[in-house]
């Protein structure tokens, strides 16, 4: 049948990550694909306990509709945590819960983008955001990065040449996919440029609490003097992604728009889940859980780096992130990682080719490897097999 779909559907393709994840459901596959937290550390017993407590103490409210912006005690806890990265002068009224930060990305596009508008992003950038924004028929201007963040002269050029830039999308800590982090100086400059050219910044920051080396940096939003930075956060990487609780933190003028969109999309996030996380944070120490995760991930990162150094040809460049879940690997120019993928899958190993992270093309020789979800012996085995595939190819 030739159904009359909306024009915007032309822009929407299956996510490479989701496609690879489908292939990796076979238990024999060692997958470095999705940015999956280590599920053996999910707090299952604690969740049983807190669920029972929530239902006993507050069961009726936990199963009832609730306010669109979310359960206030949990919003207050988010405010306290944001204060640690320099986001001050906010209250629970500046926080709205969303179904993961992914919904915050979709809403950002819905709130700001008309067809033909421009989104400025890092080159490369998070595939899930690119796909979410594309649905609203925007164009991307992608700005290259060095080890301190976006190149500011190129960003300013883009802001000068494109009057219809609606927002600048950045992932300042342990970026997905490159693992790069912005320097404090660049974060300040970014806000100054946004002020000068009157645009909004969408700061997507799911990984900042997972730091394995280097010094913590203040959030881009901490330099925001004009309420033009929208901060997206999530419990996915520090707690459990299946719960689907993320948040938008912004000034009231912008946040009210997100609230209206949330009402139209799904009214609110799950009442029970918000209380489960809140109760967990009352009874247990989320920071100590994060500390334990950091130890596990730091070791897994190290094992992956060492094994790559051992098994990959010398010309391969491994970018070692100070935190987050990924290593970003640049192969010699003539290697196309999308074409390499079936060969590697034959060896029951999976990674994510880098090209889909480039909204305007490029990056064919790059790939993203997640080290979080596999135990150390599987990382060693998988990278060894990947090295064999590379040797056969070269
Ligand atoms: C940069 C970035 N933003 C947003 C998300 C979405 O996270 P969630 O919707 O689980 O909060 C992810 C998930 O991997 C991500 O890497």
Image (spheres, rainbow, N blue to C red):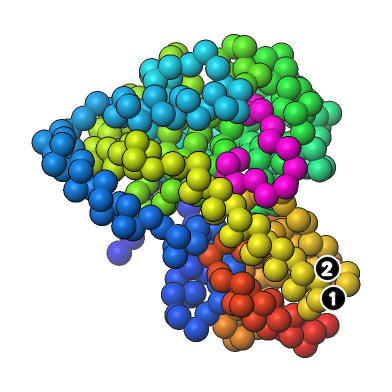
Residue 167 visible = no
Q: Nearer the viewer, residue 121 or 160?
A: 121
Instruction: Determine the residue positioned at 56% across, 37% down.
Output: 204
Residue 56 visible = yes
- Is 209 part of what is drawn in magenta? yes
Residue ranking furthest to the right: 314
Identify the disc placed on residue 313: 1
Disc 1 secondary structure class: loop
Measuring from the top left, give residue 34's x and y in whole percent: 53, 62
Q: Is mark 1 within 8 Å of ligand 1?
A: no
Measuring from the top left, give residue 172's x and y in whole percent: 66, 37
Answer with the quarter of the image where residue 48 lies: bottom left
Measuring from the top left, give residue 161's x and y in whole percent: 75, 25
Identify the disc placed on residue 316: 2
Tell me if residue 88 comes above or below residue 2 in the rendering: above
Q: Nearer the viewer, residue 381 or 18?
A: 381
How crowded is the residue under tag 1: few (<14 C-alpha within 10 Å), some, or many (20+)? some
Query: Is the C-beta separation of discs 2 and 1 under 8 Å?
Result: yes
Measuring from the top left, give residue 102's x and y in whole percent: 45, 43
Instruction: Determine the residue positioned at 80% across, 67% down.
Output: 331
Answer with the quarter of the image where residue 374 lies: bottom right
Residue extent of the magenta highlight: 207-221
How crowded is the residue under tag 2: few (<14 C-alpha within 10 Å), some, or many (20+)? some
Instruction: Determine the residue positioned at 56% across, 48% down.
Output: 291
- Is 270 part of what is drawn in magenta? no
Q: Main secondary structure of the magenta part?
A: loop
Residue ranking furthest to the left: 60
Q: Is residue 178 left or right of residue 83?
A: right
Q: Nearer the viewer, residue 338 or 66?
A: 66
């Amino acid at each position: 049948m030739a159904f009359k779909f909306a024009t915007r559907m032309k822009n929407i393709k299956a996510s490479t990550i989701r496609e690879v994840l489908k292939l990796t459901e076979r238990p024999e596959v060692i997958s470095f694909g999705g940015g999956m937290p280590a599920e053996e550390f999910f707090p299952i017993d604690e969740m049983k306990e807190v669920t029972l407590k929530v239902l006993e103490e507050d069961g009726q409210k936990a199963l009832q509709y609730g306010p669109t912006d979310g359960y206030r005690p949990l919003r207050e806890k988010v405010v306290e945590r944001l204060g640690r990265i320099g986001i001050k002068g906010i209250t629970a009224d500046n926080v709205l819960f969303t179904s993961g930060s992914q919904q915050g990305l979709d809403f950002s596009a819905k709130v700001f983008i008309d067809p033909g508008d421009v989104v400025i992003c890092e080159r490369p950038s998070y595939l899930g955001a690119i796909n979410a924004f594309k649905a609203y028929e925007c164009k991307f201007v992608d700005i290259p990065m060095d080890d301190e963040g976006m190149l500011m002269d190129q960003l300013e050029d883009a802001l000068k040449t494109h009057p219809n830039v609606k927002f600048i999308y950045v992932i300042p800590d342990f970026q997905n996919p490159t693992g790069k982090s912005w320097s404090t100086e660049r974060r300040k400059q970014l806000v100054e440029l946004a002020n000068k050219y009157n645009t909004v910044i969408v700061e997507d920051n799911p990984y900042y609490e997972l730091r394995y080396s280097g010094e913590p940096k203040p959030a881009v939003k901490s330099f925001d003097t004009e309420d033009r930075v929208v901060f997206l956060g999530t419990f996915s990487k520090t707690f459990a992604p299946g719960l689907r609780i993320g948040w938008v933190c912004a000034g009231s003028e912008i946040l009210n728009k997100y609230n209206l969109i949330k009402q139209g999309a799904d009214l609110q996030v799950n009442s029970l889940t918000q209380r489960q996380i809140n109760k967990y944070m009352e009874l247990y120490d989320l920071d100590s859980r994060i500390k334990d995760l950091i130890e596990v991930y730091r070791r897994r990162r190290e094992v992956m780096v060492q094994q790559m150094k051992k098994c990959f040809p010398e010309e391969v460049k491994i970018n070692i992130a100070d935190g987050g879940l990924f290593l970003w690997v640049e192969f010699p120019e003539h290697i196309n990682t999308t074409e390499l993928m079936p060969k590697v899958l034959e060896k029951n190993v999976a990674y994510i080719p880098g090209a889909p992270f480039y909204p305007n093309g490029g990056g064919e020789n790059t790939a993203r490897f997640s080290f979080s979800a596999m135990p150390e012996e599987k990382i060693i085995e998988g990278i060894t097999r990947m090295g064999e595939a590379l040797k056969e190819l070269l």
